Each structure stands twice: as C-alpha cells, then as structure tokens.
Image: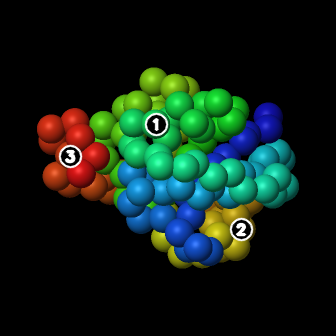
Amino acid sequence: MKERIAIALEGEEISQHFGHTTQFCVIELEAGKANQTGNISLQDGDCHSIPVFLQQNQINKLVVGGIGQGAVERLQEANIGVICGAQGNLVSVIEALEKNNLQSTDSLCSGHSDGGCH
C-alpha cells in the first residue's frame, strides 16, 4: 500500500514546531522504497490551517518534531497519521521511513492545554 507522507522542514532539518512550518517534503512510500515527489509550501500557515492544507494535498501521514495535542487531533480528524518527535535531517528521516524504523515518540509539546498553538 502506497503512503503519501509530508515531512515538515526547516531548511534541511525536521521542523521542531509544527505551527510554524511552511515547507514540507512529500514522499510516496511503497514496499520500503521512498520516491520524493517534491516540496509543497504553505503561505501564512498556522496549526489550524496546516491540516486542511495537507488533506488538500492528499497526505496520509505527517512527520514532524514538536507538535501539540490539539494539532494532532485536528490531523487525525483529517485522517492524517502523525509521527512526532522526529529529529535530524531529511535524508536520515527518509532512510528511517524506508527501513520502517521511524516511530513516534509521543512527546507532545506542552503549553497547549487551551487548545491553542502558541
């Protein structure tokens, strides 16, 4: 089964703050082989608009560093799985995805108890 995965980026590194992410590398992963399809960019995004943007781009899963519980819930409502706690550069994350070695740490950002992003 092919998955369409967005990897949240800050330059070539994994973004550590989901609500500020505007750049995503999109890969299609099938049978342990990743095919990089390109990057997508969001102008003036926030943690409320990003799930809609990803859904419009037919993303099945998101890889990100830091993310709050409210954002995870909005992504799940949009049928987008989340791998959070990722660190490192794009190449290492793609390699880990191909080897099925990238797992969510479930380490969510704190300070989001009001449902907000800030």
Residues under labels 3 and 2: Cα distance?
A: 31 Å
- Whether residue 84 is visible: no
Question: Which residue lies under the disc numbered 1?
Answer: 49
Q: Position of residue 14 (x, y in %)?
A: 53, 67
Q: Nearer the viewer, residue 86 or 38?
A: 38
Residues under labels 2 and 1: Cα distance?
A: 29 Å
The image quadrant of residue 35 is bottom right
For disc 2, the neighbor class at 10 Å (few under 14, some 14 to 19, many from 20) is: some
Q: Nearer the viewer, residue 62 or 30?
A: 62
Q: Is residue 36 left or right of residue 43?
A: right
**Would you say the residues marked 2 and 1 are in contact, meaning their CB atoms lie under 8 Å apart?**
no
Q: Secondary structure at mark 1?
A: loop
Question: Which residue lies under the disc numbered 2?
Answer: 95
| Type of amino acid at the residue the image marks with label 1 | Ser
The residue at the point 52 percent across, 26 percent down is 78
Residues under labels 1 and 3: Cα distance?
A: 17 Å
The image quadrant of residue 102 is bottom right
Q: Position of residue 97 (x, y in %)?
A: 67, 58
